[in-house]
Amino acid sequence: MRAKRKTGKFRWRKWIPIFIMMAPGLIYLFINNYIPIFGLVIAFKKLDFQAGIWASPWVGLSNFTYLFKTPDAMVITRNTILYNLAFISINTCLSLAFAIFINDMKNKLCKKIYQSAVLLPYLMSIVIISYIVFALLSPDKGMINNSILEPLGKEPVSWYMEPGYWPLILIIVNAWKGVGYNCLVFIAGIAGIDPGYYEAAQLDGATKWQQIRFITLPCLKTTIITLTLLNVGRIFYSDFGLFYQVPMNSGALFDVTNTIDTYVYRSLLQLGNVGMASAAGFYQSLVGFTLIMICNFIVRKVDRDSALF
């Protein structure tokens, strides 16, 4: 018995350095993600700053109703969902294409060029997007109006007053910003595939497309599903900077750029009702959690190994 206890203590002690390394991240996660959960009570109260959170009067579900009774409810819900569906599908396809292309380059180019190509998607994702977009689309000094349309004899376009162009602009900007991270994840996944599969396929006369279809994509299936499930959980959220700062908060573009997040922010500025903003956040989180559970259940039924849990 003593020997077993000593063995158990030794096994526990050998993990102490790992626990110490984990501690900063776990402490941050606890402070930043779990302690604020108690603030969800604000969604069911009319917050009185003088009385405090716990002494503020209960209002039940009335904070949730403004999000559904507003005449813009259908517009903001439609924009949030459809944009996110477009972002998920387009960004995944582009990330896969870039990852496969860059991985193929390592066999054809020297090491330094390959390393630069690997960093390219990351650099794409960290550029200050809103300033670049304004530099391109500015009505007076924008590159597109002055350097492209004017030499072609075309009339300049007031981009921030024309809502018809913005669905495409937002999709392109989001792809530019977000493809880099997913691309690096897929590159890491491709690097883990046994090169013997490709060598055997080449000996059998498989074309490049056949290698991608029957080797690369099946091996990346779990990674693709995992990233998609994580993105589905945020389908009722939107990139605030993309939908608020990039269109410069132009009122003429609200029909195509207004989402749940931007609507709540504008309502908070006008009404100052923290309870309504908290209710919207709680609603988004609840829907996101439900969608992840449903999608994960479906994936688990089809392919148990590809599910998150």
Image: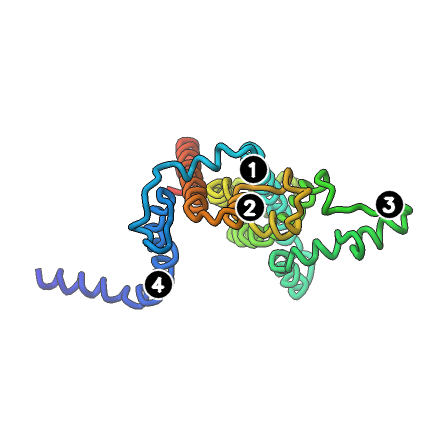
For marks 4 and 1, the one nearer the N-term is 4
Q: Give whichever of 196, 29 is nearer the camera.
A: 29
Q: Residue at x 34, y 57 (%)?
A: 30
| Tags 1 and 3 touching, CB below 8 Å | no
Q: Kindly report which numbered mark, 3 or 4, lies closer to the viewer in this rendering.
A: 3
| SS class, disc 3 | loop
Q: Which residue is mark 3?
A: 155
Rendering coords of residue 178 (x, y %): 59, 51
Give the labeled residue for mark 4.
Answer: 22
- Amino acid type for the residue under numbered disc 1: Ile
- Of marks 2 and 4, which one's residue comes earlier in the chain? 4
Q: Which mark is residue 262?
A: 2
Q: In front here: 273 or 140?
A: 273
Q: Is residue 188 left or right of residue 1?
A: right
Find the distance from the CA under tag 2 to the CA under tag 1: 9 Å
Give the structural element (helix, strand or loop) at label 4.
helix
Question: On the image, which quarter does residue 251 sit in?
Answer: top right
Mark 2 or mark 1: name the one nearer the start of the chain.
1
Query: Circle 1: is it few (<14), some (14-19), or many (20+) Cα within 10 Å?
Result: many
Residue 89 placement: quadrant: top right
Asked if marks 2 and 1 touch (Cβ < 8 Å), the reply is yes
Mark 2 neighbour class, 10 Å CA radius: few under 14, some 14 to 19, many 20 or more? many
Tell me the residue that label 1 is attached to: 76
Return the disc, 1 or 3, that comes first in the chain's sequence: 1
Badge 1 marks a residue whose secondary structure is helix
Label whose residue precedes the other's in the sequence (3 or 2): 3
